[in-house]
Image (cartoon, rainbow, N blue to C red):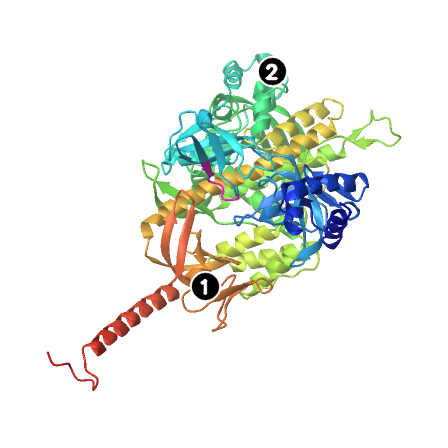
Amino acid sequence: MKNLKRQIEKLFQSEKHKAFNYKQIAAKLNVTSTQDRQEILRVLKLLEKEALIEEIMPGKYVALYVSQFIEGKLQLTQRGSGYVITGEPGADDIFIENEYMNTALNGDTVKVHLFAHKTQGKPTGEIVEVLQRARNQFAGVIQTSQNYAFVVPDDKRVYVDIFIPKDRLNFARNGDKVLARITEWNPEQKNPIGEIVELLGKPGEHNTEMHAILAEFGFTIKFPEQVEHESQKIDLKIPESEIKARRDFRNILTFTIDPEDAKDFDDALSIRKISDGLWEIGVHIADVSHYVREGTALDEEALKRATSVYLVDRTVPMLPEKLSNGVCSLRPKEEKLTFSTVFTMNEKAQVTDVWIGKTVIYSDRRFTYEEAQQCIESGTGDYADELILLNRLAKQLRDERFKQGAVNFETEEVKFKLNEEFKPVGIFKKVRKDAHKLIEEFMLLSNRTVARYAYDLKDGKQKSQENTRKTFVYRVHEPPSEDKLKLFSMFASRFGYNIKTGSDKAIAQSFNKLLSEVEGKPEQNIIQNMAVRSMMKAYYTTQKTSHYGLAFDYYTHFTSPIRRYPDLMVHRLLFSYLNKGKSGDVKRYEEMSKHSSQMEVQAADAERASVRYKQVEYIADFIGQRFSGIISGVTEWGMFVEITDYKCEGMIRLSSLADDYYEFDEYNQWIIGKRTRKTYQLGGSVEVVVKNADVNKRQIDLELLDSVMHQRQSRKAEKRNKKAEQGKHKKGPTGKKRRR
């Protein structure tokens, strides 16, 4: 036993960064007998008692004096490896190899044992505990056998299939698209055990795939019965007592401007002339908080969803239809309850006075963006003079923002023309014109005004000597990190553009110059997307910092409570403070803010997945056809190319490059041929051929046109050589034909 103990101690000392279970130790020491393996277990318990090793997870040990643990959120790649993001300023992401996942899945909050060594300069580690699951339900296709089944998840970042016992199939059949829930996953098990909770339909059918996307990202179309019941009980009639308690705007010109297919009208604008050169502009927001009370089933479901989701063919609302499209929606020719910011503005768009409070309005007209734009451009039509004035004021507000250092992020948005079967028959880019920007500027003005008002409030009831600020929910956006800026600067330079990395304002001005110069060029979409990726993500928090992208010192979300839960939180806090209420529970509001931020990310992922599905479905009609593209990503297994015409991305696998053996150079971020030294790098223009489009995987496979031509030439050469070889066999030794 003493000899075995010394061997095990030596093993832990020589590989201080690693954790071992008894099976791994037995393999390292070439121990095969059952008796000796039992001895290893006894030695491990002894070493643990001597405080030389520590059991970091059931049956797994690490040398105690090198143990270091970090908590963070796991982000998986489609290759099965991943990174744990700690969220600490300046902290590196921790690389996790597939073998060290220990049942953790994408988005999970985990505890990591940090290794002493690094991999390619990155800190590495092993996940020793899943602290909180991001989700436990996954959409996928079921594969059944006689006694059991497996669900193959749609999400390729889920690196295992889910084992389904026969008695938990819930009538699902082989090949069905289903929603499965993981019920058990022991670290010793290769696959999690689960059950089928919903049958979604047949793979490839439009409704099936849309429901699967929603399920994949944690959303559902149906509302619980109690929620629907509460919504139906809401009285549509506004009591006279409620109208008297509010500022009345019903006789002031008011209208909405929204997309043509919109039904949930969150916001309206009112306008009236006070005197020469002075105007009263009202920004009126649906008073959802009047109808959705805290503690109700309606409120709990709204918080759970936290946001509406906009797929290519439908809106999945945060609130039931009676509220989102009915009682709360600011529909024309109807009296509605609102929460408003009312501005007195001069001809230079300078705000000379502000009023904030509850109101009642009557919308005189519902404009689509196209109708409002027509009035602005032609100078004719309903309320054209008022629209032209509002547009002029909005442009001045916009110009001032950019002078202060705002970044002009206007990414190209892909829209689809769908036929009656929801099959895409056309792809086009959504164009933002003055009517869109008009609404945007007044919403931004309202949001930052509310944030500034709330920040300036002091809670005089605190026991501390100094007054503290009242709890509020802010929308914050931090400046980009130096590393991300460097990467984007290198990327932009390949197109001949420069990014200055001095002050925050200089960076913003440099970005705006680039985004203006790139407009209308083939590389516009990819550069805009890379610019957005180089920025930090905005999020909700009770800790006020500035909004870098908008160049605002104070910012919140106040203007869309029908479709965003943080706006509903802001309405409740603001109304309470306007009525001398006490400060909100900061811990509770911070938790709700974090949840809302997470659900916002999931909603955006779902929206992108639905767009991706339709792009792949559309491109499936162009198999074998040639397109121009731009290299949008390079990896060790291939390169991503964005097809310029349709703004969709496909992959060229390294194995398909026929003219040379290519390798990924991580340092230079390019793919290089071993013999020819030919390189493919981010931003490079290429001609591609569509090889395959798999709608179930939402995956497009491309080939380089050069490789396709090379393969064709090679095949022709092979045929010629084969014919020549056959001709030789028909001739004699002198080269003459044999006599028959």
Q: Residue at x 61, y 44 (%)?
A: 101
Q: Which residues are magenta?
A: 151-157
- Establish if 533 lies above or below 603: below
Residue lying at the far left of the rendered structure: 740
Q: Splitting the image into 4 quarters, where does residue 103 fall?
A: top right
**Residue with the mark numbered 1:** 685
- Residue type marked 1: Ser
- Give the camera-side residue of 705 and 44: 44
The kind of secondary structure element at disc 1 is strand
Q: Position of residue 359 (x, y in %)?
A: 60, 23
**Residue with the mark numbered 2:** 242
Quarter of the image with the N terminus in it: top right
Question: Is residue 287 visible to the viewer in this orientation of the structure?
Answer: no
The kind of secondary structure element at disc 2 is helix
Q: Position of residue 278 (x, y in %)?
A: 62, 37
Q: Residue at x 43, y 25 (%)?
A: 170
Q: Residue at x 42, y 56 (%)?
A: 644
Q: Residues within 10 Å of mark 2 (few under 14, many from 20)?
A: few
Q: Position of residue 343 (x, y in %)?
A: 64, 34
Which is more foreground, mark 1 or mark 2? Answer: 1
Quarter of the image with the C terminus in it: bottom left
Residue lying at the far bottom of the rendered structure: 734
Choose the circle earlier in sequence order: 1 or 2: 2
- Residue type marked 2: Glu
